[in-house]
Every structure is written in structure tokens, then in C-alpha cells.
Amino acid sequence: MALMKLLRERTHVVMIILVIAFVGLIGLEWGADMTGRGPGGQYAVGSINGESVSYEELRFEVERQQEIDRQQRGGNVDEFRRREIINEIWDQRVNLTLLEQSIGRQGISVTDAEILEAIRTNPPDYIRQQEMFQTDGEFDQTKYLQALNDPAVEGWSFLEDQFRVMLPRQKLINRVISGARVTNLEVRKAFVNQNEQLTARYLLFDPEDQAVEPESITDEDIAAYYAEHPDTFLEGDRVSLSYVMIPKQPSVADSQRVERQIDELYDQLVSGADFETLARDFSEDTSNASKGGDLGFFGRNDMVPEFEAAAYETPPGSVSQPVKTEYGWHIIKVEETAVRDGEEQVRARHILLRTMTGQQTLSALNDEARQLQARAVESGLEDAARFVRAMPDSLQVESTGFFADRPDGFIPGIGYLSGASSFAFASEPGEIGEVLENTSGFYVLENAGVKPAGVLPLEEVELRIRSILVRNRKMEQARLRGEEVRAGLVGGNLDALSGEMADQVATTDPITRQQAFIPRIGQDLNFIRGAFQLSETGELSEVVEGDRGYYLIQLVDRKPLDETTYEIMKENLKRQLLIQKQNQLYQEWLTRLREDAEIENNLRDFFAI
């Protein structure tokens, strides 16, 4: 507060807009603790070089980001995104903590004069965007300085607090990136890569056109490849889960409830109710309910069979009796029929009621899952599945097979299930987990076994190796075919080809060295490198190995660079390259910092991931 007295002698009015805007930025972004729950809290979710991170603090940030996502995406956060958020927030905390620790080790500090200068000359975006500081939609420095020096305006201490945190970080980052330099040669190369264009003709020798039988790969071939490529088959810890899924399927009572509702709507329509009004009020087909259920014209085979049959059997102006399809119960009103493009078509509206799983059904299924879990703890999952639900509608015990921990939490056979990955890699063989659920059903999991990290045994990767060797042989045959064709080309020109092979020659659009996508090829940097090695019109490449196979490439045209454009662009291009180098230096420095740090991550003990 003392520093801000340099700007004013007294304060009376609170500038609420600025205060609220700034509070919205406080948190992990620059290290303040809005929750009052700092690293000294009771539960540590992890530590960075001995500095603990409290669970409550991290949870606050996770929940805040989830709410931001919900508002931005207009819906709930799914399990995949939720897991991403947890890991992103943890990574942010690690990076910021390492940054602060480096500031301390290097003795970096800022003076009051530096803070004051930053406040005057470099206000953050949330201030620049305030209407009170703008003229014609643009930030007005004069208005800002007037407010800054106005003794009747209070609230600037928030800005001072921000710069006391941000300026030391910026000083450290400036030290890290100070070595970034861009030469004129690099600028020229970047311009060439972005702007030099050529057009080429090419012939692809596709390995998939080659005949190699999997049976031609011998056991000796497989064993030799396995011995020569041990790192290819190195896996981390793997776990197998047995699981029972109780699906969230509608019960008989749910189906009967929807049938009663559709019958009631049908009775109202027969009694003269307006179809469009009922469709807008009750139809659960969100694609057309607001339009009174209007489906427009459709022909044969455009709809599921049950719906189509009812629509074509109902006279124009009439309403069908309720009809059931895989989507639910429908009432169809046929507006008109017509012959369009030689086909009889129907224009209709419909009301759709889906058969949803009711709360009572969900509660009963949850109770069944908990009964299954309790029994499984006593006698194992197989026995519990037989006991809890008798034949013929028995519960099936499924297996995921052995799988490695994935960053996104995906589990074979199950998909995304919050808490499943945490249980899998924190439990012991035979252990039963708590009941988990997703939109598909309720799950009871059992750890069915653990395989420690190491090279996968040959029998587990035999099929994978066979596929690799088949592909390699096909590629080799494609290469030999390409060399054979090239050797036989008269004048070394693709125009000498005839018949089916001539029809396979394609021409690119103008491409650059940084071309992201080539029609009919996709992304293939080897193709681009091979094409740009050609300098003379009509020149034919050697056989070029690409991602899809082997190519013969012939230069059609190569446009010279526009030197005037280069002179216009080079300074801006140099700035872009400098920023890229600075970012690269910072990321490399941060990576080394993380590699050298002692980081303890206990997220799985606190979050269901």
C-alpha cells in the first residue's frame, strides 16, 4: 500500500470493476491462494523439491477449471476431460513452484520503482479491456493514467500485488531466453520453406498391392526380429481387471410408463389436440421438436423399417397409432405425399418419447451393484456374480486383459470410467474396488493380476511382429517394382507409361516445403523432401520412400521466389522466429528443471483418475 501512496494522497471511491476482474485471475496462474488453504494444509497431494501441495488448494483449482469448461462448452465435463483437467492443474502447479524456487535460488527481486513503472506503462489485459479506460473501443493510456493518479479511485493495490509476483518471474524468464538469436540465413530459409512452390507428377507403388502371405513369415524370422528390437516391446507395469457391468437399462416399469405417456398423447391428438403444439412441448427429438416435429420429405430406406412402414401406411392428414423403434415411441403425422425424382416420398412430423432409465430403476441397479461388491469382497467376483443374479439373466464377468497405464485413463473393454485406472494401479491382485459408474452402467472391479515392467514375452507379440514383417516385405517388393519401372522408362519420363500404370499417375497442386496435406497422399514429409530435391523441369527422382509406399516424382513446375515479398516479410518473419526460439529455450529449460526436481505425485490417492 505504501507504494501506491506515491500515486495519490487519499482514497474514497472503490473501483469495484477492477477488483472483481483481478480476483478472477488469482489462483494457479500466478500463485495466490484464494482458498486460504495453502501448502501447509492437512493433506498433501504431492510435493516439489520438498515443498508440499495441499489437496484442498488443488481441488479448488480443478473445480474452478471444470466450471469454466462447463460454461464454455455448454454441458457437463466428461471423464476424459476431467482427467485432463486434473493433470493440467497439477502440471501448472509443478511449473509455477519450480519457477518460484528458481527465483529464490537466483536471488531475483524487484524494486518499488520497477513495479511503479510497470503499472504506469504496461497494465494487464483485464485493465485494458475495461470500458472506462477505452476510447472508441481502444485502450486509452491518458484515461488510464488519469484514473491511476485520481485520489478518489481505490483498488490499485491489487495491481501492485500482481506485479510483485509477475515481475520476478518475467526477469527469470528473460534470463533463460536471453540467448535466443535469429540469423539472416535462418530468416531466408524460413521464407523459402513457407513460400517456394512446385508442382509435381508422381506414381505411387503401394505396398498393399503386393502379395505377401502371413504364412511366409517363419518362426525363425519372428524370433530374429524380436531379438534385434527388444526396446520395441518394452512395457511399463500392466494390470488385468475382471469386472461386472450392470447396464443402466430401462426396467419394465420404465417401458410401461413411456407407453402410458405416448398413449395419453395419442388420445389427445384423436380428441383434436394440435400436433405441432404437442410436438414442441413433449417430443424428445431435439433436432426438430422446436419445429413442431417436422421431418421434411423422406423416401424409402431413409428411416428405420418400423417408422417407414407406419409413415407410408398413414394417409395424408392422418396420425398413426404409436409405433416403437430402437429410438423409442413415435406418433407420426403425415402431411403429404409426392413423387420426387421418380420416387414416392412422404412429408411427416413426429413426436418421440424415449424410454429412459428412471430414478427408481437407477437406485435399484445401484443397490444391486453394492450387493455384488459386498459379496465379491467375501468370496470373489465370479461367485458373487452367480449369487447376486440367478440364471438365465446372470451377470457376466468380463476381462480387460493386461493393459498399461494410459495418460487418458482409457481401459480396454471398459473405456473411460472415473476411478478405474486409479484402482487398477494402486490395488493388489484379488482386491475388489468400490462401485464405480459412468453413463453406461455400474461397475464392480477385481484386480486379476499384475505384470511388472519389462520386455513383453515373445508369445504376446508374435502376431504384432508377423504384421511388421509382412509390411516390411511388401515395402521391399514395392521398392523393387519402383526401381524396375524407373529403369524401363524411355527418356526417364512418366509420359512414357501406358495402360493402367499411366492412369495411376497423379499431379499435385502447388505445394511448399511446409505443406501439411497433399491431395490423395495426405501428410508425407519424405515425399515433399524428394520433390524439392528436383530442380529442372521434367527431372525424375530416384525411387522415394514415403509413408504410404514408394514414389517416382517428376517435376512439372517450380516457381521462383518473389524477392520483393521477402523484403516486405523478413522483419516480421524474424520476430516470429525469435519468439519460437525463445519459447523453445524456455521449454527446454523447464524440462531440465523438472527432470532434476524431486517430484512426488499422489494424485491417485485423492482424485478418481
Image (spheres, rainbow, N blue to C red):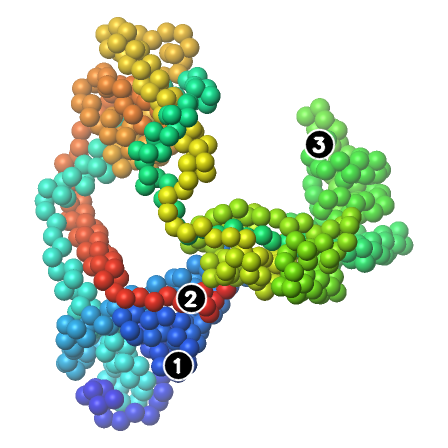
Residue farthest front in this picture: 379
Could you tell me how far apart the alpha carbons at marks 2 and 1 are, in whole angstroms? Answer: 16 Å
Location of residue 117 in the rendering, given as x and y in whole percent from the top left corner? 17, 77
Q: Earlier in the sequence, mark 3 or mark 2?
A: 3
- The label on residue 41 is 1
Which amino acid type is shown beneath numbered disc 1? Gly
In which image quadrant can residue 201 be found? Answer: top left
Q: Nearer the viewer, residue 137 or 348?
A: 348
Asked whether the viewer can see residue 573, the reply is yes
Q: Nearer the viewer, residue 129 or 56?
A: 56
Q: Earlier in the sequence, mark 2 or mark 1?
A: 1
Q: Is residue 231 above or below residue 526?
A: below
Label 2 element class: helix
Location of residue 318 in the rendering, given as x and y in whole percent from the top left corner? 85, 43
Q: Which residue is mark 3?
A: 301
Label 1 element class: loop
Which amino acid type is shown beneath numbered disc 2? Leu
Q: Nearer the viewer, residue 507 or 175?
A: 175
Q: Are marks 1 and 3 in contact (CB under 8 Å)?
A: no
- The label on residue 287 is none
**Which residue lies at the image location 40% right of the left edge and 62% below the top edge?**
87
